[in-house]
Amino acid sequence: MSERGWDSFFEPRVVAVVGASADPQRIGGRLVRYSLESGFTGRIIPVNPNRDEVFGIPTRASVAEIDEPPDWVVVALPRDRVAHTVTEAGKLGARNVSVVAAGFAEQDEEGKALQHRVAAIAGRYGMRLLGPNSNGFMNVASDAFFAFTPVIDSARPVPGELAIVTQSAAIGTYLVNWCRRIGLGVRHWFHTGNEADVTALELARVIAERGQARAVALSFETVRDLEDLHETLRTLAAAGIATAVLQAGTSTIGRLASQAHTAALIGEENELLGDLVASAGCYPAQSIAGLVNFLQLAVDQPRLPVDTRLGFVSTSGGVGVLMADAAEAYAVAMPALSAPVQRQIKGYAPFSHPANPIDTTAQVINQPDAFPRILRDCVDSGELDLLAVFVAHGLAGAGDSTVRRLVEVARSRPDAAFAALGILSEDAAAALRAAGVSAFSEPRELTSAIRAAVDARVRREAFAGRSRVVVPPPGSGGSLLDEVAGKELLAAAGADIVDGAIVASADEAASRAALLGLPVVAKLISKALPHKANHGGVRLGLWTGAAVRQAYEDLDALGARLAPDDHRVLVERQLAGDELFVARTRHPRLGPLVGAGPGGSNVEGARAVRWQWGPVGPDELVASGAVGPAHAEAVAALLAAMERIDAVTAETNPVFLTGDGRAVVADALIEIDPERA
């Protein structure tokens, strides 16, 4: 659709409601009443052959009698009357149609066929179709509330910079409710329903391209096109839009045709989609609360630094301890204020403990002017990036003394970042948000939101420059190299590989071990035994020449029995350090993926490997939690080597993270294209 066409979709000025009702509680009544009550300045055209007017607006007997092409035709009729109405809308020249009726593909085969027919009619006339089985849409900024959820009666959203796009009406209204409760403003809500035409992914992408939101809440139940998901997330990242994604059941991801651990680790797990969403710089929400907390901080404080320094002011030492624990749990720094700043505060508030957390004690009640001074001195110190304040009596409303003083200080320091912590009434939350103060109920909500927001921004900025993913044609997997050949390929590409050599006798094994330095490890090498440890083909902790000789004899005999035509013995230096699993693969539906997580023999059972769209750099590895800063450069270099060899799958496990910052490959499984084998 052209930009002008999307204008009519997002910014409607003429809306016809077919099936309009004079009953304010019926669906057809709500679809007219909500926008009318909100002050919509566009034109609403009710269509009802049985009434002369609806809420004082003259009706038309049919769509054919409308005197101008509407931007939207909203159809609130039984399903057997929808196709005819959509045809009439198309002949009139309507640009978009929203079908709020149910009973289509979600109900039965007849409904499925009817849904295809309605979509075909809309397409024939160049209209975009929202639904069917959609609750509708809203543009809060222009008071266009063409949805029928009763939430608009009880929790009508306030204008803001958040766009909500959901495939589920219940999740959408849940989000709208929660946003209103904490005063978080909304620009759009679209409920895509059965998605016969317009999908949640397409709308999120267009919202990003139009620059109509600072943040997007996206919820989907099915993903039909994973390349489309990648492109949507890339567009959101390129636009710098903070995005939270709530999965409510997703499609099955195709299983890799591979002999490596990678296939089992990816498999058919829906968690993979969460990993990939996170790798694109989005927040993979596991709850409505987590989603809203992430989004409000992203909207209010979009430039918090990666190493955010949090300050906390409270009248209670106990709550301060909870905040310190929460900060440690999510790796958020809470540095003590410098000695000069502490002396400055103690000068007028000698009863306080101004380290960090800053405990004003209850004595501040008797010296109320000290409280805003403490807040200003904390912010003006330049030693904190975000100042959170405990509001003990938030249910007292916007008139509570702590709320009032925090609002005053926040307004006087518009460039500073503030958050409130407490159980807040709706008007208290609204007053705080109007002053740019984010609102949270308890410490871990705040610290988890900080960590999620800053990590997501790091990954979003890296993902924004990615090219569109190219998914290779499906195949049956690659040709497997043995460990030695695989590590030689990685070494040639620049990977750091453990020292070792193939040996042909027990004496040569002992001599090689002496040169490498004891202890060593001995391994049985064969393409027929890719997981040699499962067959007893690894000997660890060989500290003497005799032990090495015996290991060689045992492994050679084992090879003669299990792989008589293809076996060798490898002796390597035994390394020490944390063990990591690192892999890169070309997924048949998702394109290039990289995975990193705790390594070792139980890598499949631990289910701790995190997957991302490749390529990734050091900052993204740290943000994903896969590796710490000390080894991020080395692991990123290993992944770059894997990318250079362009294998179907390159898997290294274990990779030893050494004390000097290296990432040394001790074992590898490489699958290459059969023609390269």
Image: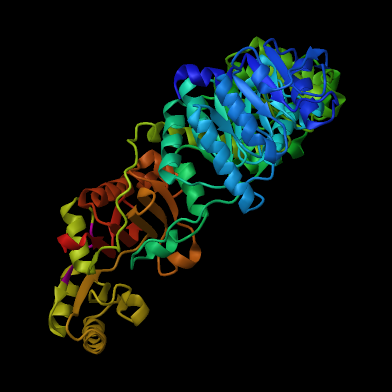
Residue at 45% x, 61% y is 267
On-image quarter of the N terminus: top left
On-image quarter of the C terminus: bottom left
Q: Relative to residue 208, is residue 42 drawn left or right?
A: right
Q: Which residues are magenta?
A: 497-501
Most frequent secondary structure within the magenta stretch? loop
Residue at 32% x, 56% y is 474
Closer to us: 427 or 73: 73
Q: Is residue 454 visible?
A: yes
Query: Can you tell which quarter of the image residue 265 is in?
Result: bottom left
Q: Is residue 337 visible?
A: no
Q: Is residue 219 magenta?
A: no
Q: Relative to residue 447, is residue 566 drawn left or right?
A: left
Q: Relative to residue 634, is residue 435 drawn left or right?
A: right
Q: Percent from the top left, x then y, of residue 569?
A: 20, 78
Closer to us: 163 or 514: 163
Q: Percent from the top left, x then y, of residue 512?
A: 15, 74
Q: Percent from the top left, x then y, of residue 203?
A: 53, 31
Position of 219 relative to 4 (above/below): below
Query: Can you tell which quarter of the image residue 331 is in?
Result: top right
Position of 26 relative to 640 (above/below): above
Closer to us: 643 or 634: 643
